């Protein structure tokens, strides 16, 4: 039987600045997670820092805490909205994998590369709304943060979240994407995305179930419809499962069943 997610992790950290975290923390605690909120404290030198770098600092704080745990650590941003059946869901990664790098619970611009013999999907995602790391991979991510601090530095916008999968994979870690999303991104667009010609809005393409509570952005039907349509479009345009990956796979049937099967639901 597949091990439940909540039994596969140690601590859960909610990253926040001034956001309200009580609904999220209360729900995750009730789901069986050991929750702690990590709030970023504003400092005078932060005035010139890019938002992307400030976000990196907050995640780095959680990575430092992950170094203290022998079990994988769940990290979520304050605007993550879990699905109501979160406590019942399986781990999206192989608990026996000693080279687990990162396992996303929420994906953005996802791709799949491989389906393991155990049925887990390895692949790519960006956005750090909800994910799992280990003691080993957290150490590498701290190294990445150090490199970004040195170049290009705190004041420059850096899409650091887009490079994490490559960074860990190049260091022999295995990175996992879920069958369906364990929750939704409830946040508003980061203005730096528009300034750097990036997508201004991202939502989960397909969820594991109904949300535990309403996201703060409102217009739930509209936003969920946008997410589903975009997800289906990425599948049809071979962006979720790319042609060269499928043709080069030793098990193309597994990839096709995973990619198509996850979209076979009427749920928004």
Image: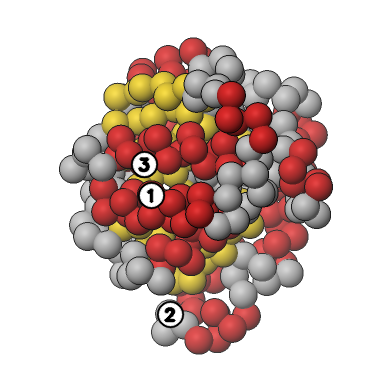
Residue 11 sits in quarter: top left
Report helix, strand or loop for mark 3. Answer: helix
The picture places residue 261, in percent across and down from the top left corner, at: 55, 59
Q: Is residue 31 above or below residue 203?
A: above
Which residue is disc 2 drawn over? 251
**For the residues bearing labels 3 and 2, Cβ distance under 8 angstroms:** no
Q: Is residue 16 above or below residue 140?
A: above
225 to the left or right of 50: right
In three-dimensional space, the C-alpha distance between marks 3 and 2, rounded to whole angstroms, equals 34 Å
For the point 42% across and 84% down, the residue is: 250
Q: Is residue 142 above or below residue 6?
A: below
Which residue is disc 3 drawn over? 63
For the point 57% across and 36% down, the residue is: 54
Q: Is residue 51 visible?
A: no
Residue 4 sits in quarter: top left
* Earlier sequence position, callout 3 versus callout 2: 3
Front-lying residue, 234 or 58: 58
Dot in front, 3 or 1? 1
For label 1, count other residues whose C-alpha is less than 10 Å away and answer few (under 14), some (14-19) or many (20+). many
Which residue is disc 1 drawn over? 142
The picture places residue 67, in percent across and down from the top left corner, at: 26, 42
190 to the left or right of 100: right
């Amino acid at each position: 039987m597949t091990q439940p997610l909540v039994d596969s992790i140690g601590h859960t950290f909610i990253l926040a600045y001034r956001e309200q975290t009580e609904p999220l923390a209360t729900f995750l605690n009730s789901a069986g997670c050991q929750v702690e909120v990590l709030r970023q404290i504003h400092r005078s030198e932060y005035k010139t820092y890019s938002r992307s770098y400030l976000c990196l600092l907050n995640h780095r704080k959680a990575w430092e805490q992950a170094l203290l745990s022998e079990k994988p650590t769940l990290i979520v941003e304050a605007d993550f909205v879990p699905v109501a059946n979160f406590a019942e869901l399986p781990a999206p990664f192989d608990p026996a994998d000693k080279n687990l790098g990162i396992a996303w619970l929420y994906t953005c611009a996802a791709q799949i590369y491989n389906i393991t013999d155990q049925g887990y999907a390895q692949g790519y995602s960006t956005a750090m709304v909800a994910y799992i790391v280990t003691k080993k991979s957290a150490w590498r991510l701290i190294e990445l943060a150090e490199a970004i601090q040195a170049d290009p530095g705190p004041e420059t916008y850096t899409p650091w979240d887009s490079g994490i999968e490559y960074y860990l994979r190049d260091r022999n870690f295995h990175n996992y994407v879920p069958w369906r999303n364990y929750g939704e991104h409830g946040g508003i667009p980061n203005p730096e995305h528009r300034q750097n010609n990036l997508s201004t809005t991202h939502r989960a393409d397909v969820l594991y179930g109904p949300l535990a509570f309403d996201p703060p952005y409102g217009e739930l039907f509209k936003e969920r419809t946008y997410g589903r349509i975009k997800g289906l479009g990425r599948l049809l345009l071979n962006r979720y499962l790319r042609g060269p990956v499928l043709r080069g796979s030793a098990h193309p049937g597994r990839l096709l069943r995973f990619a198509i099967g996850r979209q076979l639901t009427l749920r928004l």
